[in-house]
Every structure is written in C-alpha cells, then in structure tokens.
Image (spheres, rainbow, N blue to C red):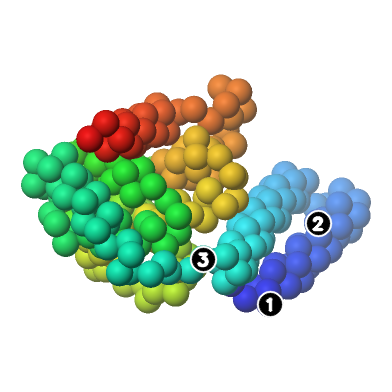
Amino acid sequence: MESSKVGKYSILFLVLGICLLILNTGFNGKGENLDAVSKQKEEAQKEIDMLKEENKQLKSQNNYLQSVKQTKNDKNGYLTWPQVETVADALVQDSGGAFNKTWALYLVKESQKYEIDPHLVYELLKVETGGTFDPDLVGPETKYGRAYGMGQFMKNTAPWVADMAGLPYKEELLFDPYYSMQLSIIYLDFLHTEYQNWNKALTAYHRGMRGLEKYIENNGNAKSWYAVEILSKADSHQTLATLQ
C-alpha cells in the first residue's frame, strides 16, 4: 500500500477541517438557514470520520505488507510435502469428499507459507459455506450487500485484500476456489498480524474490523461463537492427528 495514499488522506483531513471552521465561524445567523448550516457541518464531520477510518486501515495494511516482506518465506517443499499430503487427505475425509484433494493440497501448502494452521482455515471455510464448500455460493442479502464464493468475501473487502495479496481483482474471481482460499489466508494473516490474537482475528473476519470493536464494547471480549467454533474444531483436528 503506497504511503502517498496516507498523505492524500492527510490533505483531505486538512481541507475538510477548514470547511468545518468556515461553517462554525462564517455565519452569524443573519438571513441564513441555521438548520442547513448544521446539516452541512454534520455531513462534513461524517466525511472526516470516514476518512480517518480509511486512513487507519491504510496504515494497518502498509504495516502488514512490510511485515510480510521481512518475515514470510516458503519452506523446502521436498521436506514438507509428506505432511502436506497427510493433512490434505484428512481434510478431504472430514468433508466427506466435498472439499476435494487439489483444494486441500493448495490450502495446506499456502497456509504453511504464512505459518497458519491449515485446519483453522479449513474450519473457517466450512462455517462460511455451511459445510458445502461450494465455490459458487452467494450469501443472503444484508444491509452491507452479499458475500461471494468459498471465503464469502463482500465486494467492499475483496479488492483491498486482493491488493495486499498482489492479485488482480475481478468480481468473477471470487468464485474461483483457489483465489477465494488465497484471499482468506491473506486476510486471516493480516488480521492476526494486526491483533496478535485469533479470537479477535476470526471475529473481525466475520464482522469486520469495526464490527470487532463494537463486539468487544458490548461483550468485553472477542470470543464470538464464530471464533470459538472454528478454534475448537481446529484444535480437535490437531488432537486427532496426535493420537494417530
């Protein structure tokens, strides 16, 4: 994420701040519609708040990209492949064949690159698709729009996650299972890098970053049903593998 974008928002904050100052001091009430002035002030303040939120997100993305450049690397495939195939086979078996072998191999290999437990990503995709792993899934209509594909990404989130991943963005790509899985892995890694806590990362995946803040305000923690279910089931996979 280019640092110039952050500078752009700083200039916008300044311009909007000046507008607010004019609105606050430039009218003396003589022949002016005070309600209209008040409405303009509210709209300007909303614009400033929105830009602040976007600026905060841009800074988080920039920090994440710097972290990826410094710490993420691919491990020797020859040494890791036997484990990749073993875990992939277990995921296919758990899904009853709904999650096919090539998807599973891709998911495990890509998760390894980001040091994320592949069982966690798998369980997230299971929850998001209701256990169907349907790459063509279209979620129900909400006030924020619909979610698409296996990772159930909305069109306001997918483009900037794709940008972080260094991927092109087209709406039809959301129905590509490999593309959708890649976005899920990148988004999870970004959120976990941001919060350093899987309950927070998963709840943010489900509710959005602002939704996470509201959830914590209302509940005192980030242990949503979504996070608890995914983490507990991912742990059960690990436990089973240990017993075997």
x, y percent for residue 166: 44, 74
User: In the shown orientation, is residue 109 left or right of residue 100?
Assistant: right
Q: Secondary structure at mark 2?
A: helix
User: In the shown orientation, is residue 67 left or right of residue 122?
Assistant: right
- Amino acid type at image mark 2: Leu
Determine whether label 3 and label 1 are within 8 Å by CB. Answer: no
Q: Nearer the viewer, residue 17 or 66?
A: 66
- Amino acid type at image mark 1: Ser
Q: Nearer the viewer, residue 95 or 218?
A: 95
Of label 1 and label 2, which has the lower sequence position?
1
Question: Which image quadrant for residue 154?
Answer: bottom left
Residue indicated by mark 2: 20
User: In the shown orientation, is residue 168 left or right of residue 71?
Assistant: left
Q: Nearer the viewer, residue 176 or 195?
A: 195
Q: Secondary structure at mark 1?
A: helix
Residue indicated by mark 1: 4
Residue indicated by mark 3: 72
Other residues around mark 2 within 10 Å, as few (<14) / some (14–19) / many (≥20): some
Of label 3 and label 1, which has the lower sequence position?
1
What residue is rendered at 14% in x and 57% in y? 101
